[in-house]
Amino acid sequence: MNFDEFTIRISKIKNLPLPGESSHLKMAPQFRLEELRLARKKKRNTKKAGVMALFYPNAEHRTNLLLILRKSHPKDVHSNQVGFPGGKAEKKDNDLMATALRETHEEVGVHPQQIEIVRSLSEIYIPPSNFEVYPFIGLYREARPFVPQASEVAALVEVNLVDFLDDSNIFMENLTTSYAENVSVPAFKLNGYTVWGATGMMLSEIRMLIQQVL
């Protein structure tokens, strides 16, 4: 889709109710459902994070969504996975939106003033890392080449909107992770990468909102 048309349509999601849990559960691994239910009751002292779903025009002025492949870190349960730019809140951040903007600047080089926030999305709790993640949708209208942070970003994953919305790119796959072995999970296949877990759940909400305004 042409990016100019997309920006007009995406503005309409500001007044839509958030699908929230109903959209998250569509992409939640079966083994995680009971874990999530129990975790909500007893979670405490959660860490906070802000992430950015950044839409921008590619060279042909078609709409892209930016994801990143995180570098591998031995003590990070989310390393070597595809996710949104973003990260842990710091005391200097005024709020979680400021966190998402700061982290996006650090990880891919987009200055906060260049991002137009469309809206916040439903937060999501991640039991393995005890994080509550707050996603935001942003527009990067005057897109320039990204500058990946060498210490955190292994690769940029620039996803065409058409591929993101294509039903055939949602499937089930068996995966082994740092905390589960040979489990079947719902996932997106985007640019050759398997995108699942919390990122897949957040993508599901974004996808449901966009489909309502196209």
Image (cartoon, rainbow, N blue to C red):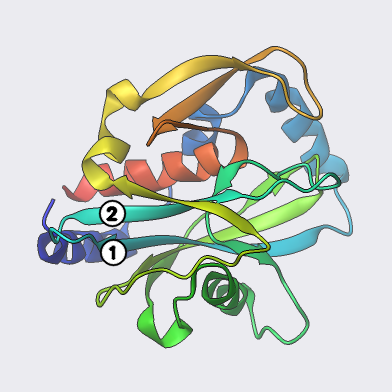
- C-alpha span from label 1 to label 2: 5 Å
Q: Quadrant of residue 211?
A: top left
Q: Position of residue 62 (x, y in %)?
A: 16, 55
Q: Position of residue 164 (x, y in %)?
A: 31, 39
Which residue is drawn at the image coordinates 72% and 71% (left, top)?
Answer: 89
Which residue is drawn at the image coordinates 47% and 70% (left, top)?
Answer: 147
Number of other residues with Cα within 10 Å of mark 1, as a class: few under 14, some 14 to 19, many 20 or more: many
Number of other residues with Cα within 10 Å of mark 2, as a class: few under 14, some 14 to 19, many 20 or more: many
Q: Which residue is mark 1?
A: 56
Label ID, residue 64: 2
Q: Quadrant of residue 85?
A: bottom right
Q: Relative to the observer, which residue lies in front, 86 or 74?
A: 74
Q: Quadrant of residue 88?
A: bottom right
Q: Position of residue 32 (x, y in %)?
A: 71, 26
Q: From the viewer's perspective, is 129 left or right of 169? A: right
Which residue is drawn at the image coordinates 40% and 55% (left, top)?
Answer: 66
Label ID, residue 138: none
Q: From the viewer's perspective, is 92 left or right of 111? A: right
Residue 20 visible in the picture: no
Verify CB contact (< 8 Å) between mark 1 and mark 2: yes
Q: Count up the numbered dots.
A: 2
